Structure formats: structure tokens, C-alpha cells
Amino acid sequence: MALRIVLLGPPGAGKGTHAKILSERYRIPHISTGDILRSHIKSETPLGKKAQSFIDNGKLVPDDLVIEMVNHRLENPDVKNGFILDGFPRTVEQAKALGALLEERKIPLSFVLEFDTSEEVIIFRLSGRRTCPKCGANYHLQNIVPKQDGICDQCQTALIQRKDDTIDTIRERLKVYHEQTEPLVKFYKDKKLLRVINGNLEIGPLQKQLSESVGL
Ligand code: AMP
């Protein structure tokens, strides 16, 4: 059966990392709205130009822009066997729009996975995070160290620190998460779609918990 999941949780909870692992395991696309927006910024598209200042300041890109982008992405035939949504929805408005888009296409969500993660862990992970601007792989100064200092293992590109991974912007992103995204926990709990896992766990133990408690 097609696996259609939403990964919900604050920035730095590990959504991107686990989305990549699950995407390979189940051969379904990993749809990260953050990655799509960053690629629009890189290619200087009209959407990229509109989105840039919101992203750089840790704010959410307006709902209508992101919803239209996801609507377009879901037209791609690669979603026929399922998908992993990472970073979308992020507001109740987006969640309602997603519900309508999926209902229209008759492809209901399997479930929503909440990464329950402490603020301390998030700040440690994001402030030490280094990212490959080419392939999107993530590393960490202490935790996930590349083989060669500052260089991506997969494509040999020089790693960067995302502009929004600096401490002030991290704090703003956390505030935005609590105010605008956390209400989705109740939204999906009420729909009986919510499964919760411990986002403080490192990659291996979290995968183990996923397999034992969620069957992934
Ligand atoms: P991420 O890579 O998921 O942490 O996203 C990086 C940034 O992209 C966020 O801080 C937002 O500015 C923007 N963004 C990503 N997804 C969304 C979304 N669903 N709604 C609004 N803004 C988003």
C-alpha cells in the first residue's frame, strides 16, 4: 500500500535526515518545501525572489505561495506510490489546503509523524549544522563529521552554514514553530492521524524506534 506521510516537528528535529532514509527505503519521493524554496532562490525564479527574505529572517513564506508550490509538486507522477512531506504543512491553513488537495486526488495520508524534540537539542543541532549547497546533505561539526573537513562526502562540494542556522534566526524559527506550526499536533491528533516519536534520539536509535513503534 502507498505510504503517504507528513513529518512534523521543529527545525532541527531530524525530519530531513529521516525523510532521506525512508525515501530510499520505500522508493518514494522526499518532498521538502524548504529544499524546493532554496532551489528557487538559487535559480532566481520569481518565487525564489519573493521567498528569500522570509527564509533569511526565519519567517514562514506566505501560505498561498507554498500551497501552490506543493499543489504543483503533487502533479508529478512520481507520487503515485506515496511520498514523504517534510516541512509542509506548517500552518493550519496549509494543513486544510493539503487535506483538500489530497481528497481531490483521492490519496489520503497514511499518518503524520511528530518528532517531539527539546529546545536544547534543536539549538545544538542547528547551530552546528553544515549543509552541502549542491546536494543538500547535512553534517554536524561534532556529530556527523564529513570524511574531509568542510567537504561533502557525496559530491565533494564545500559545505556552508545556512544563513538561517545562526543563533538569532534559530530562535526566531523556534518562536514561529510554537506559534504557527505546533497547533498542527492537535489538528492531526483530532483526526487520529498522529504518531509521536522521540526526536532527541540520534539517527540509529530513532530508526529503531520508528521500526518498533510505527512499523517503518
Ligand atoms: P526548512 O528547510 O524546512 O527548515 O525550511 C526553511 C525555511 O523555508 C523556513 O524557515 C521557511 O522560511 C521556509 N519554508 C519551508 N517550508 C515552508 C512552509 N511549509 N511554509 C512556509 N514557509 C516554509
Image (cartoon, grey):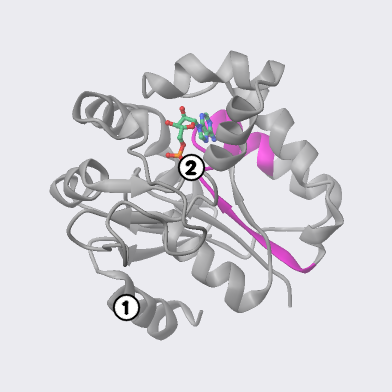
Boundaries of the magenta span: 81-98
Taking depth in this image into account, of 48 and 185 the one nearest to the observer is 48
Does residue 84 show up magenta in the picture? yes
Q: How far apart are marks 1 and 2 (CA)?
A: 25 Å
> Can you give x and y, in whole percent of width and height, for residue 213 in the image?
39, 80
Residue drawn at (21%, 24%) of the image: 168
Residue type marked 1: Gly
To which residue does mark 1 refer? 204
> Can you give x and y, in whole percent of width and height, for residue 30 in the image?
61, 57
Residue type marked 2: Pro
> Can you give x and y, in whole percent of width and height, for residue 70 in the image?
70, 38
Disc 2 element: loop
| Tally of numbered tags | 2
Residue drawn at (49%, 36%) of the image: 90
User: Is 147 rendered above or below residue 72?
Assistant: below
To which residue does mark 2 refer? 133
Taking depth in this image into account, of 158 and 11 the one nearest to the observer is 158
